[in-house]
Image (spheres, grey):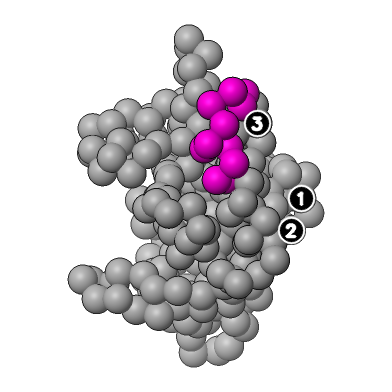
């Protein structure tokens, strides 16, 4: 609920998320894990989000796809280990690591592609247990801003070691939030999901305090877009 009200009041801000590419680019002969700042979405109709709600939780906000395209949010590229594309990118990664004369822009150009890549399927840790997921079913879209600090030093990504340091990760998240914000207007909102029916009044009070200069009619319209996960699971 805090995350949802935070989005309504302050828009979307990127958070660093660790991604493992070892199972994709196995030809690089290293544990290839990088954290990128991102905001993630799923392109699923309400009738198909039951499993998504069960896994990620009963809170969410749905926005117009046109808004996502206008903001340059892009569907991720799903790959499997044996595809021609995977082998091609693996070869480029190995070449870049062997060639010390390659410019930083060359590396960033390739990482720009990598940060929009995800395995077709794989395993995730859920409460200490490995659980199989077909990631392709989530139809993920990502917004991954390119960031630099006040010294124009790249904060494009974090290594696994940096990400594992809570203070370093928190500092990076704060820097990313201060430099990048994904804004939307009330008209861009299609629906607002809360977990339980009795939480709807909480969101209504949040909408009334939104900083988006909402007129009374817009506030009333947003009220009609609130729906509970309980209702979705029962009716869809």
- Measured as percent of width and height from the top left, residue 177 is found at 46, 32
Q: Is residue 108 above or below residue 188?
A: above
Q: Residue at x 36, y 70 (%)?
A: 124
- Circle 2 Cα neighbour tier, 10 Å, few/some/many (<14 / 14–19 / ≥20): few
Which residues lie in the magenta part? 93-103
Q: Residue at x 66, y 36 (%)?
A: 109
Separation of residues labelled 2 and 1 (CA atoms): 6 Å
Query: On the rendered image, what quadrant is the N terminus found in?
Result: bottom left
**In which quadrant of the rendered view does residue 184 lie?**
top right
Q: Is residue 209 left or right of residue 112?
A: left
Q: Earlier in the sequence, mark 3 or mark 1?
A: 1
- Measured as percent of width and height from the top left, residue 178 is found at 47, 25
Q: Secondary structure at mark 1?
A: helix
Separation of residues labelled 2 and 3 (CA atoms): 31 Å
Residue 42 seen in the figure = no
Separation of residues labelled 3 and 1 (CA atoms): 26 Å
Q: Nearer the viewer, mark 2 or mark 3?
A: 3
Q: Which residue is mark 1?
A: 69
- Measured as percent of width and height from the top left, residue 230 is found at 43, 81
Q: Is residue 236 left or right of residue 195?
A: right
- Circle 1 Cα neighbour tier, 10 Å, few/some/many (<14 / 14–19 / ≥20): few
Q: Residue at x 54, y 54 (%)?
A: 40
Asked if the residue at tag 1 contacts the one at tag 2, i.e. Cβ–Cβ closer than 8 Å, the answer is: yes
- Measured as percent of width and height from the top left, residue 168 is found at 28, 31
Residue 106 - label: 3
């Amino acid at each position: 609920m805090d995350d949802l009200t935070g989005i309504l009041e302050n828009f979307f801000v990127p958070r660093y998320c660790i991604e493992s590419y070892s199972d994709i680019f196995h030809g690089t002969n290293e544990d290839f894990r990088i954290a990128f700042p991102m905001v993630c979405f799923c392109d699923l109709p309400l009738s198909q989000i039951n499993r998504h709600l069960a896994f990620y939780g009963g809170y969410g906000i749905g926005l117009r796809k046109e808004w996502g395209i206008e903001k340059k949010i892009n569907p991720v590229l799903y790959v499997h280990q044996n595809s021609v594309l995977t082998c091609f990118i693996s070869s480029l990664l190995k070449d870049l690591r062997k060639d010390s004369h390659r410019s930083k822009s060359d590396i960033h150009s390739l990482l720009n592609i990598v940060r929009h890549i995800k395995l077709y399927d794989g395993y995730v840790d859920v409460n200490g247990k490995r659980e199989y997921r077909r990631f392709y079913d989530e139809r993920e879209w990502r917004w991954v801003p390119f960031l630099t600090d006040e010294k124009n030093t790249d904060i494009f990504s974090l290594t696994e070691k940096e990400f594992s340091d809570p203070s370093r990760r928190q500092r990076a998240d704060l820097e990313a939030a201060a430099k990048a914000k994904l804004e939307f207007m009330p008209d861009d909102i299609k629906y607002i999901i809360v977990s339980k029916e009795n939480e709807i009044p909480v969101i209504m009070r949040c909408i009334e305090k939104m900083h988006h200069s909402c007129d009374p009619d817009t506030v009333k319209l947003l009220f009609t877009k609130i729906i509970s996960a309980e209702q979705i699971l029962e009716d869809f």
